[in-house]
Image (cartoon, coloured by chain):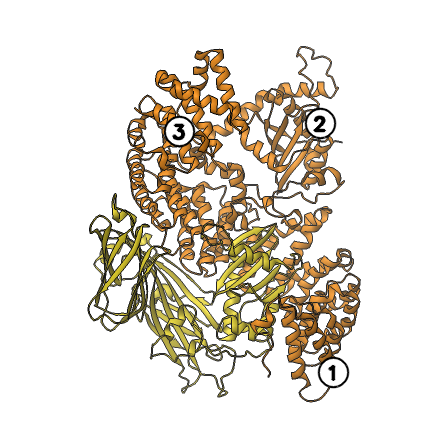
Chain colours: A yellow, B orange
C-alpha cells in the first residue's frame, strides 16, 4: 500500500503532495530528490525507478519532465505501483488536456480531488476517467498548448502535419469546448518503436518492433467500436514456422510474436476475422500492445566508415539512405557517433546544397552529431568529417569509435505493416457521423550501426 | 476567476514569506466567514486554493484552522472538498480544533447526495484524532449499510482507518465481522475489494496476539472464499484483481484438476495490458505448479512471451520492473531461456540499470549453442562509451569463460581486449585472466605470452595490479623477466598506495624466489625489509611471517608459500540458494527488484503476514507475542528445489554435464539419502535423550552415555549471522521425526511450537507456512561455548512428520544436539 504520493518539478519543488497514511516523515520529497539527483557521485548513472532509503521505498516514474513518486513502507508489488503512477499521470492528462508543470500548478485542487478518489488510505480505488467524472467537481483550467513543448508519442502528430487539427489531442476529455458542444471524434494511433542493430558489414543482427494501438475517444455515450486489423495477421512465433517462407519473401503476412489487450476489448471475433470490439472508456488508453521480431524492411540504411588519414588524423563518412516511399517524410533525425577519446577537433563537410542540416562535435562526450530536419523517402544523405587527434593512432581505430546511433520519427509510416482496415462506430442515429482519425507513426527506439 | 497564487516563485519552500501570508489569509477568511453575499463562494474558493497551495509547499497554515472551519458552512462541493483536505491534514496536530469540524462532518454524513455522504465519511475517518473516535462509530456503521456503493467503499476503508486510531474501538463495534459479511455479500466489486484490504491488514496485525485472527486469515485463503473471488474476478478493477490474485497465490489446491481449472480460468489474465495483473497471474501460475515439474516448465514457456511484450511496451520504469522479474526467472532456469538470448541484448537507449540486468541474464543463459553469439555481442559493448557497462561486459565474458563453454575462443577474445590498450579494459581483463588461470591452468601458456607484454607501469587499478603481480609470482618460471619486473615494483614500494597490491607483491616475490632464487634474492631482501617497515599492519605481519618462516626452514617455507596448486573448480556464488528461494517466494514484490528478501529492507511492523521474520527479542520476551511470527510461503520449497536442481547443481559443481534433457529430473538420491540417515540416527538418539533428561532407562547400560550437552538458555544470534552461517555450514545431521498426536493438535499456529521449543532453550529465528505445512528455523547455543546449532524444521501436520536439518559450528556435538531437538519435538503437546 502507498504511504504518500507526490509530484515534483524538475527542480525538486513540490507541486502536489498527498499523505495517505501518515507513516512516512514529511521530508520524504526532499530525501527522494536528493537521492535521484546524486545517485552516484562521479558516474553519470541514472537512479533506478525503485529504491529504498532507511526503510522507505521510493517508486517513481518520469512523465513530462515531472517526477510522479509514491512512497511505501511495505513490500508492495513494484509493477502495481509503477502502473498506478503512470495511470495517475494519464488520468490527469485526460482531465487537463495537457500535462506539464504549468497545467498541474494551475489545477492542483482538481488534482487533489482526483487523488482522493484514485487512492484511499494507500489502496488503489479507481483510475477510470469515466468513473472519476462523477466525483470530481473542479472544472479544469485549460492551459494553452501551443506555446508549450508537446509531450508523449501522440504529440508528434502536431508537428507540421496539416492533416490533423492541431489542438485535438491536447483538449481535455471532460472540459466543455468554448462553443458549448463537444466535437464528436475518436483518435486511433498506431505507434511503433523500432530497434535495429546493423553489423559492421551492414547485416541486420537484431530487429524488433514494439507497437501500441492507442485510442483516445471524445465520443459521447460510449458507443461500441469495431476495429478491424489485417485479416492475415497471425500471433505467436511458435506457430509461425509454417509461414516462415512467406514472411521472408515479404508477401505481407504480419506475424506478431505476442500481444496484450486493454480490459475493455472483446476478443470473441478476433480469432475469426481479426476484429477487436470494444466500448472505449473516456480518455487515452492502449487498446493493444504488440511485439514483432519477424524480419521487416528497416526504414533507413546507415553506413559508417572511419579511416586513418595520416598518423594523427582520420576521416569519417556517414551515409543514410531512406528506404521508404517518396510520399513519406521522416523528421527530426539525429545521427550520433562516438569518436576516439583523444579526438581534439572535427571539421565537417556537408553535401552540396544541403538544407536543414546541422553538425556538431560534442567535446565533452566525444561524439559527432548530425541533425537533419527531414528526409524524404528515397533520398540519400552523406556527411564527411575530418578528425584531428591529440596523439598518434595505434591499434584498430574502428574499435575506438562507434557505434552510430540514429533517432527519427516517421509519421504515416509503420514498419510492421499492421493496418487498421476499418474503424466502425455503432450508429446512434442516421446523422451521427463522428470524426475518425487513424494515424500511424514509427519512431526509433534503438537504431544502431556498428563499425 | 482570479489566477491562483501558486506561481512557481511563491511556491518555493525556502520562501520565508509564509508567516505574513498566513496572517493575511486568516484575516481575509474571517471577513468572508459569515458572508452570504453573491460571489462569496467564488472568493472563498480562491482563498481556499491559496491555503491549500501553501500547505502543498510546506508552509504551516494550521493557524488558520478555526477560520477555515468557520468558512466551511457551504453547499459548494468544491469548497467542501478543499476544506476536508485541509482539515484532514491538520486535525492531528490540532485535536481541540478538530472537534470543531466534527459537527459539520457528521451533518454531511447524512446528506442526501451520496457523494457528499461518502466524502464526509472519508474525511471524518481521516482526522486521526484519538479522542474523536467515538464520533466515528455511528457514521461508519451507517456507511457500511448505505444503499450507495460509493459510501460503502468509503466505509470499508474507513473501518481500517478507525482500527489504526483505536483497535479496541474497532473490535468493540464488531466492525471486522461486519466487513466480512459485507465482503461475502456485496454486489459491488470495489466494496468487496476494500473489505478485503481492510480485513487483511486488521487480521494480520491482530494475528500477533490472537489465534482467532490467525484462523480468520486462514479462512481468507480457504477454498470457499478463493472460489467466491475467482468466480467474479472480471468484475473487479484491474487493481483489485491484483489483490485477488495475490490471495489466490497463497491458496493450496487439493488436487491437480483444481490447479488446471484455476489456470484455465486465469489464462486470459496473461494477455492483460496492465503489467501488474500479468505479474500477479504469473505468481499464481508459478506457485500452483510448483509440485508439477513438467507443468511448471510449461508455465515458464507460456509466460515468456507476455513478459517480453511487457518489457517492450510501457514506460522505461514499467519495463524495468518486469525485467527484474524476468531476470529472476532467467537466473532460476537459464536453460529455458537459452534460445531467447537476443531479447537480452542491450539497446542504445537502455538506462544502465537495465543494461546491468541484461548482462547478467546473458551470462546466465550462455551455453554451448549460443555462447559464440553472446560473447561476440558482449565484446561489442567492451568498447562502449559507457565505461561501467563496458567493464560489466568484460566481466560477463569472463564469467562465461569460467562456465567453460568454448573457453578456447573466449581466451582469444580476452587477449584481444588487452590489445585494445584502454586502461579500464586492460584492468578488467587482467583480473579475469587471473581467475581463468586459477580454474584452467592449462591455458597459462597462451595467456602468459600476452600478459608478459603488459607494462606494470601502465596499470593503475589496485585489483588489476594485484592480478598481474599474482601472475608474475605464479608463472615466474615462464615469464622471462618476472624477477626483474618484481624487483622494479619492489623498488617503488613507497609509491604503492594499496595494501592489497603490497601484500600480493610480498607473496609473488616469495614464490618467484623459490623458482628462480639467484635472480630474486635481492628483490626478496628488499621486499621483506620494506614490508617490515610498512605502516599497514597486515603487510607488516605478512612480511614478518615470511621472514621468520625463511629463518626457520626454507624448505618448510616453500611448502607453505608455494604448494602444488589445485585448480579451482568453482568460484563461490555471491548469493546462497536459500536467499534466492526466499526472493522467489516473494515474487511480484520489491524483493525481486532489490534482489534481497524483504526482511532485509522492511521494518518489522511493516512486514506482511507472509514474510520471513527475524526478531528474536520479541520472541523471547512476549508470552504470546507472535508479533513477528511470520508465515512465509514455504510450502513448495522442497519441490521447487528438486525442480531446479540442475540450476543449483551448476552453481555448486560447475558441472559441464548438465544439458537441457536432464534439467527437470527429480533428484531421488537426495531423498533417499535423507531417509537413510534418519533411520540410522534415530535409534541411538532415543537413548541419548533419555539419558540426558535423566529419565534413565535403567536396563540399557550397554551404550556409553554420550557427552551431556546443555544449552545456553538465552543465546543471541542476529538473523544476518544466521543467514551467513546457514549459507556457510554444511548439513551435519538430517533426519525425520514423528510428532505426537497431541503435538499435531497443538500446532494450530506456529507460535505454539515456538514457545515450546523456547522452553527447551531452542530459539526460533523464523517461521512460516500454513496448514498443513510449516517451516521453522531454530537455533541454539552450547552452554559455555560460542558454537551454535542451526536447524531447519519442516513440519507436515497431515502426516505428523517433521523433516529436520541440522547445521552446527561444532559438528561433533551435532548428534547430541539432534537427539535433544528430537526429544523436545516429540514432547510437544504432551506437557
The chain that hosts pointer 1 is B
Counting from the top left corner in percent of width and height, residue B352 is at 43, 51
Which is in the foreground here, disc 2 or disc 3? 3
The chain that hosts pointer 3 is B
Per the image, the residue denoted by label 2 is B712
Counting from the top left corner in percent of width and height, residue B494 is at 46, 31
Q: Quadrant of the N terminus of chain B?
A: bottom right
Say which element carries label 2.
loop
**Is there CB contact under 8 Å for labels 3 and 1?**
no
Q: Answer few, some or many: residues within 10 Å of disc 1's Cα (few below 14, many 20 plus, some between 14 and 19).
A: few
Counting from the top left corner in percent of width and height, residue B602 is at 61, 48
Q: Earlier in the sequence, mark 2 or mark 3?
A: 3
Q: Residue at x 48, y 19 (%)?
A: B546
Q: Nearer the viewer, residue B775 or B514?
A: B514
Say which element carries label 1.
helix
Per the image, the residue denoted by label 3 is B489
Amino acid at each position: 500500500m502507498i504511504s504518500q504520493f507526490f509530484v515534483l518539478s524538475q527542480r525538486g519543488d513540490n507541486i502536489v503532495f498527498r499523505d495517505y497514511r501518515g507513516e512516512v516523515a514529511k521530508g520524504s520529497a526532499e530525501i527522494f530528490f536528493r537521492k535521484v539527483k546524486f545517485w552516484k557521485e562521479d558516474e553519470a548513472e541514472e537512479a533506478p525507478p525503485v529504491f529504498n532509503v532507511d526503510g522507505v521505498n521510493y517508486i517513481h516514474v518520469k512523465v513530462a519532465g515531472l517526477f510522479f513518486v509514491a512512497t511505501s513502507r511495505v513490500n508492495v508489488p513494484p509493477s502495481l505501483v509503477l502502473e498506478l503512477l503512470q495511470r495517475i499521470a494519464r488520468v490527469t492528462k485526460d482531465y487537463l488536456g495537457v500535462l506539464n508543470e504549468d497545467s498541474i500548478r494551475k489545477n492542483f485542487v482538481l488534482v487533489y480531488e482526483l487523488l482522493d478518489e484514485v487512492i484511499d488510505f494507500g489502496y488503489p480505488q479507481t483510475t477510470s476517467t469515466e468513473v472519476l467524472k462523477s466525483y470530481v467537481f473542479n472544472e479544469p483550467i485549460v492551459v494553452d498548448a501551443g506555446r508549450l513543448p508537446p509531450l508523449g508519442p501522440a504529440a508528434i502528430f502536431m508537428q507540421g502535419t496539416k492533416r490533423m487539427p492541431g489542438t485535438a489531442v491536447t483538449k481535455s476529455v471532460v472540459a466543455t469546448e468554448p462553443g458549448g458542444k463537444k466535437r464528436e471524434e475518436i483518435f486511433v494511433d498506431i505507434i511503433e518503436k523500432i530497434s535495429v542493430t546493423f553489423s559492421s558489414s551492414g547485416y541486420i543482427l537484431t530487429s524488433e518492433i514494439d507497437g501500441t494501438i492507442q485510442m483516445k475517444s471524445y465520443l459521447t455515450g460510449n458507443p461500441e467500436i469495431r476495429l478491424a486489423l489485417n485479416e492475415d495477421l497471425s500471433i505467436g512465433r511458435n506457430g509461425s514456422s509454417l509461414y516462415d517462407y512467406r514472411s521472408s519473401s515479404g508477401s505481407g503476412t504480419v506475424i506478431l510474436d505476442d500481444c496484450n489487450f486493454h480490459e475493455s476489448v472483446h476478443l470473441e471475433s478476433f480469432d475469426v476475422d481479426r476484429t477487436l470490439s470494444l466500448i472505449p472508456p473516456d480518455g487515452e488508453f492502449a487498446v493493444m500492445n504488440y511485439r514483432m521480431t519477424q524480419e521487416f524492411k528497416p526504414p533507413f540504411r546507415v553506413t559508417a566508415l572511419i579511416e586513418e588519414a595520416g598518423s594523427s588524423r582520420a576521416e569519417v563518412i556517414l551515409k543514410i539512405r531512406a528506404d521508404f516511399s517518396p510520399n513519406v517524410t521522416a523528421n527530426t533525425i539525429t545521427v550520433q557517433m562516438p569518436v576516439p577519446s583523444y579526438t581534439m577537433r572535427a571539421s565537417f563537410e556537408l553535401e552540396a546544397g544541403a538544407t536543414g542540416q546541422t553538425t556538431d562535435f560534442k567535446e565533452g562526450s566525444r561524439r559527432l552529431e548530425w541533425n537533419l530536419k527531414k528526409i524524404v523517402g528515397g533520398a540519400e544523405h552523406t556527411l564527411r568529417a575530418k578528425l584531428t587527434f591529440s596523439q598518434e593512432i595505434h591499434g584498430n581505430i574502428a574499435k575506438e569509435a562507434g557505434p552510430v546511433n540514429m533517432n527519427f520519427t516517421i509519421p504515416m509510416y509503420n514498419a510492421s505493416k499492421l493496418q487498421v482496415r476499418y474503424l466502425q462506430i455503432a450508429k446512434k442515429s442516421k446523422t451521427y457521423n463522428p470524426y475518425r482519425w487513424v494515424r500511424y507513426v514509427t519512431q526509433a527506439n534503438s537504431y544502431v550501426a556498428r563499425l | 476567476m482570479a489566477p491562483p497564487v501558486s506561481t512557481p516563485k511563491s511556491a518555493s519552500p525556502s520562501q520565508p514569506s509564509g508567516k505574513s501570508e498566513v496572517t493575511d489569509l486568516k484575516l481575509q477568511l474571517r471577513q468572508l466567514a459569515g458572508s452570504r453575499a453573491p460571489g462569496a463562494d467564488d472568493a472563498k474558493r480562491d482563498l481556499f486554493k491559496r491555503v491549500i497551495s501553501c500547505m502543498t509547499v510546506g508552509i504551516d497554515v494550521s493557524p488558520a484552522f478555526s477560520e477555515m472551519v468557520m468558512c466551511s458552512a457551504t453547499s459548494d462541493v468544491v469548497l467542501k472538498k478543499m476544506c476536508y483536505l485541509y482539515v484532514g491534514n491538520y486535525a492531528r496536530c490540532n485535536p481541540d480544533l478538530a472537534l470543531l469540524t466534527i459537527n459539520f462532518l457528521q451533518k454531511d454524513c447524512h446528506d442526501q447526495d451520496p457523494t457528499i455522504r461518502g466524502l464526509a465519511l472519508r474525511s471524518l475517518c481521516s482526522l486521526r484524532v484519538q479522542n474523536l473516535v467515538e464520533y466515528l462509530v455511528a457514521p461508519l456503521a451507517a456507511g457500511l449499510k448505505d444503499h450507495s456503493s460509493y459510501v460503502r467503499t468509503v466505509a470499508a476503508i474507513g473501518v481500517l482507518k478507525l482500527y489504526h486510531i483505536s483497535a479496541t474501538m474497532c473490535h468493540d463495534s464488531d466492525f471486522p465481522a461486519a466487513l466480512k459479511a459485507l465482503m461475502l455479500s456485496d454486489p459491488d466489486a470495489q466494496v468487496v475489494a476494500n473489505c478485503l484490504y481492510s480485513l487483511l491488514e486488521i487480521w494480520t496485525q491482530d494475528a500477533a496476539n490472537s489465534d482467532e485472527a490467525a484462523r480468520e486469515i486462514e479462512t481468507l485463503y480457504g477454498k470457499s472464499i478463493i472460489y467466491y473471488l475467482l468466480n467474479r474476478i472480471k468484475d473487479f478493477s484491474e487493481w483489485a484483481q491484483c489483490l485477488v490474485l495475490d490471495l489466490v497465490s497463497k491458496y493450496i489446491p487439493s488436487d491437480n484438476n483444481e490447479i488446471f481449472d484455476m489456470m484455465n480460468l486465469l489464462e486470459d489474465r496473461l494477455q492483460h495490458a496492465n503489467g501488474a495483473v500479468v505479474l500477479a497471474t504469473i505468481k499464481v501460475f508459478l506457485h500452483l505448479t510448483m509440485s508439477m515439474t513438467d507443468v511448471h516448465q510449461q508455465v515458464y514457456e507460456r509466460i515468456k512471451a507476455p513478459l517480453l511484450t511487457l518489457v517492450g511496451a510501457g514506460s522505461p520504469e514499467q519495463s524495468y520492473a518486469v525485467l527484474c522479474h524476468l531476470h529472476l526467472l532467467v537466473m532460476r532456469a537459464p536453460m529455458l531461456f537459452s534460445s531467447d538470448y537476443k531479447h537480452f541484448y542491450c539497446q542504445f537507449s537502455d538506462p544502465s540499470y537495465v543494461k546491468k540486468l541484461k548482462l547478467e541474464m546473458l551470462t546466465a543463459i550462455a551455453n554451448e549453442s549460443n555462447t559464440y553469439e553472446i560473447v561476440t555481442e558482449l565484446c561489442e559493448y567492451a568498447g562502449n562509451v559507457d565505461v561501467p557497462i563496458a567493464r560489466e561486459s568484460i566481466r560477463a565474458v569472463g564469467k562465461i569463460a569460467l562456465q567453460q563453454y568454448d573457453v578456447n575462443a573466449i581466451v582469444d577474445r580476452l587477449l584481444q581486449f588487452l590489445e585494445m590498450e584502454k586502461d579500464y579494459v586492460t584492468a578488467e581483463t587482467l583480473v579475469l585472466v587471473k581467475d581463468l588461470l586459477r580454474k584452467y591452468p592449462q591455458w597459462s601458456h597462451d595467456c602468459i605470452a600476452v600478459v608478459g607484454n603488459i607494462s606494470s607501469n601502465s596499470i593503475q587499478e589496485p585489483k588489476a595490479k594485484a592480478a598481474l603481480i599474482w601472475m608474475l609470482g605464479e608463472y615466474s618460471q615462464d615469464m622471462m623477466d618476472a624477477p626483474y619486473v618484481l624487483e622494479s615494483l619492489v623498488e617503488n614500494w613507497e609509491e604503492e598506495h594499496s595494501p592489497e597490491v603490497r601484500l600480493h607483491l610480498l607473496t609473488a616475490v616469495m614464490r618467484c624466489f623459490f623458482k628462480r632464487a639467484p635472480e630474486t634474492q635481492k628483490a626478496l631482501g628488499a621486499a621483506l625489509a620494506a614490508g617490515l617497515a610498512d605502516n599497514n599492519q597486515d603487510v607488516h605481519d605478512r612480511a614478518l611471517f615470511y621472514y621468520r618462516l625463511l629463518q626457520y626452514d626454507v624448505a618448510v617455507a616453500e611448502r607453505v608459500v608455494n604448494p602444488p596448486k589445485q585448480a579451482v573448480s568453482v568460484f563461490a556464488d555471491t548469493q546462497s540458494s536459500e536467499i534466492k528461494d526466499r526472493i522467489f517466494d516473494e515474487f511480484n514484490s520489491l524483493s525481486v527488484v532489490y534482489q534481497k528478501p524483504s526482511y532485509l529492507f522492511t521494518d518489522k511492523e511493516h512486514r506482511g503476514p507472509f514474510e520471513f521474520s527475524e526478531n528474536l527479542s520479541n520472541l523471547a520476551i512476549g508470552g504470546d507475542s507472535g508479533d513477528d511470527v511470520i508465515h512465509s510461503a514455504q510450502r513448495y520449497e522442497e519441490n521447487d528445489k528438486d525442480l531446479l536442481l540442475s540450476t543449483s547443481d551448476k552453481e555448486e559443481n560447475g558441472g559441464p554435464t548438465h544439458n537441457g534433457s536432464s534439467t527437470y529430473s527429480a533428484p531421488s538420491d537426495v531423498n533417499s539419502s535423507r531417509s537413510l540417515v534418519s533411520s540410522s540416527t534415530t535409534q541411538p538418539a532415543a537413548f541419548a535423550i533419555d539419558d540426558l533428561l535423566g529419565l534413565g532407562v535403567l536396563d540399557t547400560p550397554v551404550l556409553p552415555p554420550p557427552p551431556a550437552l546443555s544449552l545456553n538458555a538465552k543465546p543471541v544470534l542476529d538473523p544476518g549471522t544466521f543467514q551467513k552461517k546457514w549459507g556457510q555450514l554444511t548439513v551435519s545431521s538430517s533426519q525425520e521425526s514423528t510428532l505426537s498426536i497431541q503435538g499435531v493438535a497443538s500446532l494450530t499456529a506456529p507460535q505454539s511450537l515456538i514457545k515450546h521449543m523456547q522452553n527447551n532453550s531452542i530459539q526460533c529465528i523464523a517461521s512460516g507456512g500454513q496448514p498443513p505445512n510449516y517451516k521453522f528455523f531454530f537455533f541454539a547455543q552450547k552452554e559455555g561455548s560460542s558454537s551454535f546449532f542451526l536447524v531447519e524444521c519442516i513440519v507436515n501436520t497431515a502426516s505428523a512428520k517433521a523433516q529436520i536439518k541440522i547445521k552446527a559450528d561444532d559438528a561433533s556435538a551435532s548428534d547430541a544436539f539432534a537427539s535433544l531437538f528430537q526429544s523436545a519435538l516429540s514432547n510437544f503437546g504432551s506437557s
